[in-house]
Amino acid sequence: MPKLYPRLLPEPAQEMFERYSKLRPEDLESRFTTRHDSAVFVATGGDRISEAELRALRAAVVELSRAAGYPRNLAGNEAVEYDRHLAVLLHSHAGLVPAEAASRDLWAFLALCLLPDVAFWRFPTPPIDRVLGTDLTRHVFGRLWWRAQLVADPDLPDPYGALEILGEAAFDQIYARRTALGGSPALVQGILATWDERRRQGDFEGLVERDVLRDYLKRLLRLGSFVAFDALDQDAMRVELAAVADEAIAAVRAG
């Protein structure tokens, strides 16, 4: 059964964010909690996660964070590597399903109650959307769970290997278009596989990949008005995605 997590209501979450923003991560270590008077559970759809399970999840995240250098600030490449490992940990250990993971209040609970020290360490003096979940593409933990959810392929030797293909900013271009593109794991996996193949072939040489990706996604959005990607079998989808990628590369190169 999927796990149901506590959801921290917006008003107390806002108040906690304002208080915790003034503290160091080390000061927040003793403030973690597995419960909150203003936290609620949805009524149905799974089993409520136990406090012991929450403590186990916290222990795993803290162990990973300390191995990455906590409380020392992370450099650029260190942060990328840490996020990749944390995405795998959260997705494989949290026991969440997409319907539950779509809750902003759930991620607010994780960032402010269960893991405040880690949240404010990963993003010192963070803007509010990094903590409260007002934008899941930016939440310190939520963005990573969703990234792993959309790329995970249990049939591969490394189910999360595709996390290495695109960085955060590039992946967010896909997830920001989730209504049309980013909500389908099969389509996202196809996009990433196509992108990785073009990169290994050297097709992006002399180009800014960000520009190509932006053009690629625009073309896919237009095509999505006429093609039901999820109705295609894997081979047909890959052929279609490859053709659109080649069009995008050619257009950016010509431009």
Image (cartoon, helix red, strand yellow):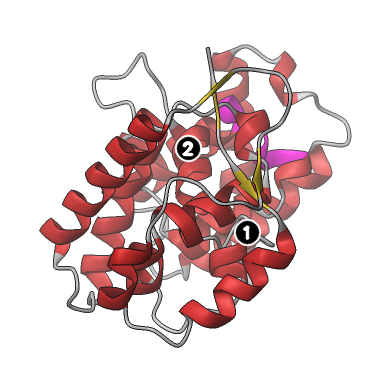
Question: Type of residue at label 1?
Answer: Gly
The residue carrying mark 1 is 133
Residue found at x 68% / y 18%:
45
Contact, mark 2 vs mark 1 (Cβ under 8 Å): no
**At which x and y percent is residue 119?**
40, 65
Secondary structure beneath dot 1 equals loop
Prevailing secondary structure class for the magenta stretch in the rendered image: helix
Residue found at x 37% / y 45%:
87
Q: Residues within 10 Å of mark 1 (few under 14, many from 20)?
A: many
The residue carrying mark 2 is 194
**At which x and y percent is residue 53?**
36, 30
Label 2 or label 1, whichever lies nearer to me, is 1
- Residue farthest to the right, as pictured: 225
Question: Magenta residues, as a range?
Answer: 180-187
Displayed quadrant of residue 31: bottom left
Displayed quadrant of residue 136: bottom right
Displayed quadrant of residue 239: top right
